Image (cartoon, rainbow, N blue to C red):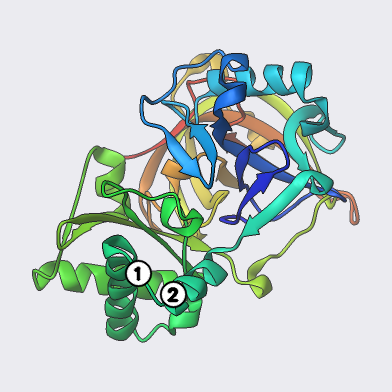
Amino acid sequence: MDGDTFITDEGFIFSVFGYEHPPGRVFAFLKYIPARFKTLFHIEFLERKWKHGKLELFRAEKLYTAQNYQTFLKTFRRDFPSYVYFCPFRGKEIISAPLSNVKKVYVPRKCLQVLNRLKRKDGLQKMTLDFVDLVSGESGIPFCDFGVHGSVALGMHSDKSDIDIVVYGSRNFRKLEATIEKLVKAGTLSYVFGNRLDKARHFKGRYVNRIFMYNAIRKPEEINTGYGAFKYTAIASVRFECTVKDDCEAMFRPATYEIENCESTDSASELSKDKIPKSVVSMIGCYRNIARRGDRIRVSGVLERVENLDTGAIHYQTVVGTGMSEDEHVWPL
C-alpha cells in the first residue's frame, strides 16, 4: 500500500505510490539509487550518502519534479526496461516495479513493531518511540494504528535524521492533527513552517530537538477502488479556482479534493460547461491536506475524462502531478 517501501534485487529503493497496482507489479517512485548506477541517472544528487547494510546509496536533490521523473523513466527504459510499464487505462508509460524484482518490503506498521521490540535502541529510535507513545496516549489512537517510515524504518538513519511517522485511517489522522495542535498550544511541541504549504498542512514540527513529520495511510476498508476499474483520458491543461466541497480524502496520497464553484483563471484553458471537474487529484505528496471544506484553492493541472468501465458512467477530474509539466500545483488561497 501507499507508504510501504521496498528494495529490489538491483538495490533500488522505492516508495509505493497509491493503492491501485497492475497484476504482478507495483506503482512506485524511486527514492534511493545504488552508487554503482549513479552515473546512469543524469540528475542533481544530494551530497550526502546513505548506507543500507553494505549498499551505498544516493538520493535525488529533488525527488518529485516532472523533469526528474522523465529522466528516471528514460533511464529505466534504456537500462532497466522491466521497470517501465505501459498502462492501458492511462495510455502512457509509468515507472512500475515487477514484484519478482522485489527483495524486501518495509511496511510502516510492522517497522514500528520491530523497532519497539529492539533490545538495544539508539537515541533516535528511542525518541521515535517516545514521540509515538506521546501522541498515541494524548489522542487515544491505538499504538498499532501508527507506523514509522523513512530512514528510521530502513535502519539507514543518522544523527541528523527526522522522525517520520504515519497513522492509518482518515479518522485517526484528524484525531492526530487535533492532538498535535493541542500539544503545540501547550508548548510540548512546536510547528516548523518552511513555506506556505507547510503552514497550510501543519504536518511538520519539532519534538525536543528533532524534526517530526506525520502523514496518513488508508486502512484496508478505506481502499475504495481497484486497478482497471476506470479509464483516464487527458483532455487539456487547465487553470482555475474552486471551493473545496469535501476534504475527507485530502490527507492520503493521491490526495483527493471534491470541489465546486469552479472559475477559470486563464482564458487559454477555459473550462467547458459540460466538462467541469468534480474533483482535484494530486499525485504530489506536498499538496496533501492543504485545504479544508469551504476553503478556496487555485489549481493548475490536467483535465481528465474518467470512465467507469463497469457502468459506463463518465465524470471529469483535474490531476496535479502528471509528470509532464512543472507548472502543476494546488495553492491554498
Q: Which residue is mark 2?
A: 118
Q: Nearer the viewer, residue 226 or 277?
A: 226
Q: At 21% across and 45% down in the image, what residue appears?
A: 193
User: What's the CA distance linking mark 1 and mark 2?
Assistant: 6 Å
User: Which residue, as the protein is rendered here, is positioned at the far front?
Assistant: 54
Q: Quadrant of residue 4?
A: bottom right
Q: Which residue is mark 1?
A: 121
Image coordinates for residue 231, horizontal then vertical, percent: 82, 41
The disc placed on residue 171 is: none
Q: Which amino acid type is shown beneath numbered disc 1?
A: Lys
User: Do we see residue 69 in this rendering?
Assistant: no
Q: At 47% across and 19% down in the image, what residue appears?
A: 266
Q: Nearer the viewer, residue 129 or 90?
A: 129
Image coordinates for residue 150, horizontal then vertical, percent: 45, 52
Q: Is residue 152 placed above or below 260 in the rendered structure?
A: below
Mark 1 surroundings within 10 Å by alpha-carbon count, few (fewer than 14), some (14 through 19), many (20 or more): few
User: Do we see residue 135 in this rendering?
Assistant: yes
